[in-house]
Image (cartoon, rainbow, N blue to C red):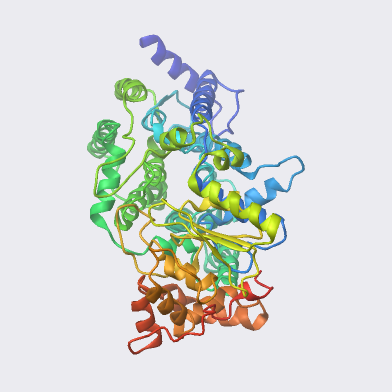
Amino acid sequence: MARLEQFSASSSAQATGGTRGFSLPGTLAQRWNACLVAACGLAVLIGGYAHRWANDDALIYTRAVRQILAGNGPVYNIGERAESSTGTLWQWLLVAGSAVPGVADPLRLAVALGLLLTVAGYVLALDGTRRLWRLRRPSGALMLPAGVLVLLPLRAVWDYATSGLETGLSFFWLGLSWWLLVRARAARAEGGRVRTGVTVFVFGLGPLVRPDLTLVTVLFLAALWVMERPSGRSLAKWSCVAGALPFGYEVFRAGYYGVLVPLPAIAKEASGTQWQYGFDYLRNTLVPYYLWVPLLLLAAFAAAGAVRARRRGRVPGLRDRTRQADAALVAAPVLAGLLSAFFVVKVGGDFMHGRMVLPALFLVLLPVALLPYGRETRVLSAALAVWAVACATLCRPPIESPEPRIVFDSHTVYQRGLDHPHPTSQAVHVAHDLPVVDAVRAARNAQERHGTRSLVLETVDDAQYPVLPLAPHVKADLAATESRLGNVGALLPLDALAVDTLGLANPLGAHTLPTRHSKAGHEKPLDRAWAVADLTPPGTPLPAYVDPLRVRAARHALTCGRLAELQASVRAPMTPGRFLQNLGGAWSRTQFRIPADPVAAERQECGGTGGGSGNGAGTGGSVRSGGGGR
């Protein structure tokens, strides 16, 4: 150990000073640190590749991507403007990547790109932490892994390095933002010129990566303000640079889709409060890995360091700007992580194990991901390494959590359900023998051979898929209702209607009130009477489980009041007047909700006691009865 300490000291003595870029050339300590960062990135790459997969929600992205590339606009179904993609930037990255010749399956691209972005995010984050400690030790120091050892052994980290979702982009944006924030502080500490344009622009992308990352954007911009203290004119420039793209897209969203947030945020009631479910979800992430052990060790280390520094008089206060800047730099990711975790708990968590907790954990651990070599850090790193080995080899998340709120180990569930170790292509997902697959294929064959126009209607328990005729006003030749939206979206051609029964891509379903809470994001099951009323002609023979009185009420409700206006906002032809009308009503439309029960909805929107006096078409200016839905 004495030799290692001498090595660290001699390496620091050889350093030339200043904050150097991340590269292999340099002192022995710098070479070691570079290798350490690379090794951690390699560990993420290996673990993520070994666990490569894609889930059904990723197929929701890829159908929207295919619609854009086909010239139908950023929609899930032709004729209905619904923003089904939560991660706006992720959707458009996949569009750009899928436009490259030779890229045939956007789902495979999503898996590969997600893995590469995750690895890049970890590398940038670790190099940012290395630079952070160079601020305190300009001569350089040998770094040891600390906080990063909390992340690397988690199965959830390996699983969501791919999955086809926007999680990889989230890690990349967080890592890049941290790296830029530290670089700005280092440049100011060295007395050099600080170029904040790119930094501010990148920070501003948070809402487009995921809407909930807006919180991180605000805190990182606030930390940069404390570090730079820009003039009023510079602050105005920052606001323009950071806000131009998010604000411009928000105007487009409000005018084109008629609401202020992606449709899944409305379907999942992201502004709601479900504390108990949220705490259960948090425990589902922390308990299986015994995460409280490394987190307590790191918290004790940080507290002991703060006490020692105060006793030595190194922290007399935060009166001078240098200490304020340093405090803001360290506090920004920690506070952002804690508030992100608070938000996840508040809204009730998620149904995918660990997924929504990982960004918060990543943020909290950023300042201590690596620590300078010393007696205390040597012991800490060794203890964390022991826990990490035990966690990686022994700890597994439960396949499914107990009631009352379902949380899945989604990666394992999809492996078993699809009977494939790496379900990364659309072909694997649609090849599985599900009842809806057979029903849709039979309907497609009937349409191709006999011109039959059909609605494949999913029962609530997936036991049956009866086929009903489509109404004349529906321009599509085939439609199917299904709760596995991504699967049916990949199965159906782009000109068919994939009718979401959970509201993620169905404006009507998204604006209903929640009726069950057994699974996060699946709280608004669509009464099949709504789909029958919207898509079939009056007098259609109904399956036994569909109440004709509810269908009649739904037909009437679709022609009344705010519900008719909601339908028109997403289905009426897109003209300048329609755009402005959508823009003006976006706030109230985002807040609008109707009862899930068609009879109650009819009573609310049509007044009186109802009675189902509608004309039967029930499309409220539906673009399904005409073109121009883009």
Q: Position of residue 183 (x, y in %)?
A: 53, 43
Please say if 69 is above or below 616: above
Q: Position of residue 84 (x, y in %)?
A: 53, 59
**124 vs 256, nearest the viewer:** 256
Q: How many marks?
A: 0
Q: Is residue 593 visible?
A: no
Q: Position of residue 253 (x, y in %)?
A: 57, 68
**309 vs 302, nearest the viewer:** 302
In this rendering, would 341 be left or right of 86?
A: left
Q: Is residue 261 visible?
A: yes
Please say if 570 is above or below 400: below
Q: Position of residue 592 (x, y in %)?
A: 41, 76
Name the image quarter holding the N terminus.
top left
Q: Residue at x 45, y 60 (%)?
A: 501
Q: Residue at x 72, y 60 (%)?
A: 71
Name the image quarter holding the C terminus.
bottom right
Q: Residue at x 56, y 70 (%)?
A: 257
Toward the bottom, the furthest residue is: 608
Toward the right, the furthest residue is: 101
**500 vs 477, nearest the viewer:** 477
